[in-house]
Amino acid sequence: MFKSFFTKIFLIIALLFSCEKPLTDSSKKPPLSFTDVTENAGLAGFKHISGAIGDKWFPESMGSGCGFIDYNSDGWVDILLVGGGSWTSKSTPPSPSLFLYENNKDGTFKNVTNESGLGEIYTYGFGVCVADYDNDDDDDFFFTTIWNNYLFRNDGGFFINASDGSGLENDSLWSTTSIFFDANKDGFLDLFVGSYVNWSPENDIWCTLDGSTKNYCTPELYSGVHSRFYQNNGDGTFSNKTEDAGFLPSPGKMLGAAELDFNDDGWPDLAIASDTQRDLLYQNNGDGTFDEIGAISGVAYDENGRARAGMGIDVGVIDKSGKETIFVGNFSKEMISVFRHSNGQFFEDISAISKVGRPSLMTLTFGLFLLDVDLDGDLDLYTANGHVQIGIEDAQDGIFYREPSHLFLNDGNGVFSDIVPLIGGALSKPIVGRGAAYADYDNNGTLDILVTENNGPVHLIRNNNLNNYLRVKIKSINSNRDGIGAKLIAITKDNRMIRKVKTGSSFMSHSETTTTFGLGKNQMVDSLYVYWPNNKVDIFLDIQSSQEILIVEEKTN
């Protein structure tokens, strides 16, 4: 039956074969463990700068995102870090806002910020999103800041500030999250930019925890700033279609955005995490417009009808239902939100059923993403945690400024258990966690974790787990070059795995777009379905495990 689909020639190129032999005996599988390799990897010199000098200005508590990017197109992911910034009105030297570390292919990285054209960027930065927006086969990225945002075009490993003349140059609102996605499926990636609040040094509000000393305020005291939607014109420029596309009005205070297709109609929808405002769900109408249905769908508020303080967000299929589930990291005393699509426009709250809710109640979750951390075929959940108020433990029992990560393992049925208290190690170290992303930085098949701290270091956490896997990189010819929006389904003798190729997600961060299927003890993928963004379907049979393959879409007339 499957062979009937092979009416055309498709190219599958093996890029990487693991030096590890496929596991055949589960007894040989080592315990799940992680190692902080930051220093050995050459990243210990990085430190995020919040700009704090005692005034407790509101943006200083936010931290920044991080990302993986293959800037030189060599098949090894590099690391892109946001350095934060300093206040130019103060008598402090300017602090670089971006740092790029090139992968040396031996587990280490070298700082190539200056050589790549990013060394003279001085602003107050927040987030990054990576994509090939001009379809020229290399990774570009968008950089959000408290002032003017930047669009960086990759020119052979050198980044050019392409903001001027792009249609994005007048975007001067405090921007946080961003996501590239092909909203109208014309083959060019559009851009959604979420903004936060209306803040300036002049309107900073005096707040306190102890009644006498200034501390950071909550965003509830500031008015939100609306999002923007930019349509890609296909010539390197964008047009502001925010109102025409239905993204106005919006409450603002957005910190995370994730692509999904909850109704499985082939059109990309957007889920938005908002801080102290209702979370949003934009349904794509398939005609260049969106309807915001968060309240109708049940994802906008908690069970008491109250808006939560949403930070990071991700979406994925976590159980045998085949339906997408939305995860949102929230403030302390607000458990992580878990919404599984049920039918039509409706989602059900499964925070308690999934057993994610209670363990996350007291932590403040920023970075958040789904990944198959143990390569057993189902998606697990990682969260980066840390509070915004220094000294919060003195004011509230059970709440801490520095917090360990959560790593929730999925039992295959969408029920999770946090293993960090059991395994200890690198993930149990209390940090002021903010941005978080994942990638296979050492090309051994396992997914590693990158997490930033506010006004602190970055952490590269190597995943020591071994299991069989298949990694799939796709290249679209008829749609956007990265294949953003494509759905991949891998079938083995005992599992059916659904994954989406996407940008964005987490907290102002970018994970790799290569898709990893954990195969457990299976040494073969029986069939792999690739649903391209243009609705074409390719099917491949009998693919050996423990390799990375590139699938190139055949050009159509």
Image (cartoon, rainbow, N blue to C red):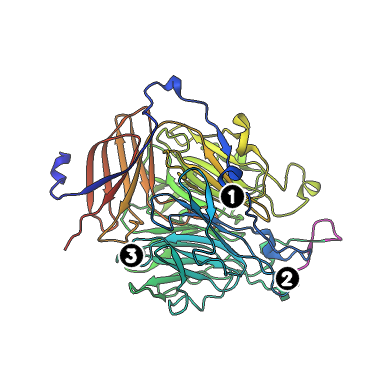
What kind of residue is marked 3?
Asn
- Dividing the picture into quadrants, the one containing residue 208 is bottom right
Q: Residue at x 34, y 61 (%)?
A: 137
Q: Is residue 144 visible?
A: yes
Q: Amino acid at mark 1?
A: Leu
Q: Is residue 518 above or below residue 348?
A: above
- Residue with the mark numbered 1: 43
Mark 2 to mark 3: distance in Å?
42 Å
- Magenta part of the chain: 203-213
Q: Compute the Cα span from label 1 to label 2.
A: 34 Å
Q: Which residue is mark 3?
A: 135
Nearer the camera: disc 3 or disc 1: 1
Comes first in the chain, label 3 or label 1: 1
Q: Indicate the position of residue 541 as horizontal and vertical percent values.
A: 22, 38
Label 2: element kind: loop
- For marks 1 and 2 on the same chain, the one whose residue lies earlier in the sequence: 1
- Residue at mark 2: 204
